[in-house]
Image (cartoon, rainbow, N blue to C red):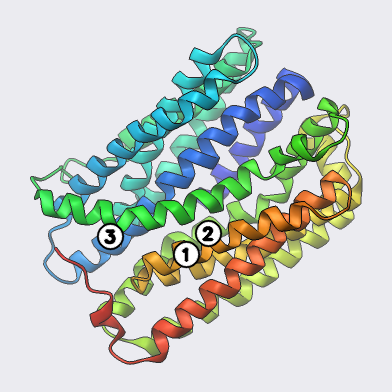
């Protein structure tokens, strides 16, 4: 329910921004969105999975949750600084005269995302799903309040709307943080261990989220003749196509701690049954999304963004089908992580990323090429991760192989 509210608030937020900025200026806003939720979320989302895994294990073993929390926050802040430095050259070459504002709101979002996803990993690992839900509700509510304020005072540039994102994240963490969840003194070895565990996960997640959020942006670079209005419409349609991903986020929050507990108990049968129980409705969710867009895609686009946004129905269906394929990776990636297959999952994503370039070169129109490329990567990665998980379960004693230092 909390994630449902957050998803709805995100679409309301997007609809307001789309209408306030128009297709061309929304393309500039989407540059920030791609950096924040392609690069930033790509680096920080794995913290939820890894902190959740370590917290769930600590709860069932030594109970030292505070040390994991401290190590997670430390590594997340360090990663934020590195990301800010890495995107600076790209920002300096961005069009327009607001490079410093773009870099400021993007860096702020990196920090806020890091803190938020460490917090969510803690809540997920402790099965505190009431507060997990409350954090998403708070973030969505603050977004809506602030975007309403931006419209009321007549904000006309994209960076004012972009600043809403980090503020909402930090407020949501603050209102759901409990006093007993204090940062405890931790050892350099644990911080180093978390950093080493996170490195391959960040590689995999950066490729994954870049595919989801920056994939549609690639349409700018495969068109023979640039069309800003078409680009903006395609980016708006991508928000509709990604709707099943929002719905699936609730499943991911519960999935990791359950898989981690199965590993602690060395219960391969429960692990396998949990993965299969999630895969079936995931396939159904993706199919529902494709059928929904096939029936009402153009109407939904007009409802979300306004009549000035227009995209052929076939392009919307292909893009939605591509994201439906991506849903499979959202089940298999945490399954591989729960088994401790961090490096193997990263290798699979690197191989998958190479297929994007190959599919991109197909002799077809720009919209179709991007959709086929996203679907190709998703199916390639799903097959690879499926093999990694199957191999991890096929031989005995998998709990011992997934143990980590505490």
Q: Mark 3 against mark 2, which lies toward the viewer? A: 2
Residues 362 and 328: in front is 362
Residue shown at 54% from the left, 15% from the top: 99
Residue shown at 55% from the left, 48% from the top: 209
Residue 44 location (% of width, % of height): 40, 45
Q: In 3D space, how far apart are the residues under numbered discs 3 and 2 (Cα atoms)?
A: 32 Å
Residue 351 location (% of width, % of height): 56, 63
| Residue 219 at least partly seen | yes
Which of disc 2 and disc 3 is earlier in sequence?
A: 3
Q: In 3D space, how far apart are the residues under numbered discs 2 and 1 (Cα atoms)?
A: 5 Å
Q: Which dot marks residue 126?
A: 3
**Which corner quadrant holds the C terminus?**
bottom left
Where does label 1 land, which residue? 347
Q: In this view, does 83 lie to the left or right of 11?
A: left
Determine contact: label 3, label 1, CB under 8 Å: no
Residue shown at 39% from the left, 28% from the top: 85
Q: In this view, does 127 lie to the left or right of 96?
A: left
Determine contact: label 2, label 1, CB under 8 Å: yes
Where does label 2 land, which residue? 350
């Amino acid at each position: 329910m909390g994630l449902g509210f957050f998803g709805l608030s995100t679409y309301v937020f997007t609809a307001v921004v789309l209408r306030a900025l128009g297709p061309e200026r929304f393309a500039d806003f989407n540059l920030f969105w791609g950096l924040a939720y392609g690069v930033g979320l790509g680096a920080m989302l794995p913290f939820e999975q890894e902190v959740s895994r370590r917290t769930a294990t600590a709860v069932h073993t030594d109970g030292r949750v505070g040390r994991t929390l401290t190590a997670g926050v430390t590594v997340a802040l360090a990663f934020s600084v590195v990301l800010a430095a890495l995107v600076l050259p790209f920002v300096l070459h961005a069009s327009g005269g607001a490079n410093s504002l773009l870099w400021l709101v993007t860096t702020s979002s990196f920090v806020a995302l890091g803190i938020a996803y460490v917090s969510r990993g803690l809540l997920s690992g402790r099965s505190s799903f009431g507060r997990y839900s409350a954090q998403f509700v708070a973030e969505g509510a603050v977004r809506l309040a602030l975007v309403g304020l931006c419209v009321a005072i007549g904000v006309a540039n994209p960076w004012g709307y972009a600043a809403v994102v980090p503020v909402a994240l930090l407020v949501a963490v603050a209102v759901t943080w409990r006093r007993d969840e204090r940062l405890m003194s931790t050892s350099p070895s644990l911080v180093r261990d978390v950093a080493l565990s996170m490195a391959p996960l960040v590689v995999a997640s950066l490729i994954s989220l870049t595919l989801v959020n920056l994939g549609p942006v690639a349409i700018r670079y495969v068109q023979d003749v640039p069309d800003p209005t078409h680009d903006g419409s395609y980016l708006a349609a991508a928000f509709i196509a990604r709707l099943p991903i929002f719905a699936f986020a609730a499943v991911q929050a519960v999935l990791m701690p359950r898989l981690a507990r199965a590993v602690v108990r060395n219960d391969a049968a429960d692990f396998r049954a949990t993965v299969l129980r999630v895969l079936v409705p995931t396939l159904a969710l993706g199919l529902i999304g494709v059928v929904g867009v096939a029936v009402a895609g153009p109407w939904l686009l007009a409802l979300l963004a306004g009549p000035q946004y227009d995209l052929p129905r076939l392009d919307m269906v292909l893009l939605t089908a591509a994201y439906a394929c991506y849903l499979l990776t959202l089940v298999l990636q945490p399954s591989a992580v729960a088994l401790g297959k961090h490096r193997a999952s990263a290798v699979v994503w690197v191989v998958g990323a190479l297929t994007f370039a190959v599919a991109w070169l197909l002799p077809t129109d720009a919209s179709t090429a991007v959709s086929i490329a996203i679907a190709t990567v998703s199916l390639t990665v799903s097959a690879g991760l499926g093999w990694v998980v199957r191999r991890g379960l096929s031989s005995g004693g998998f709990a011992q192989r997934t143990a980590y230092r505490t």
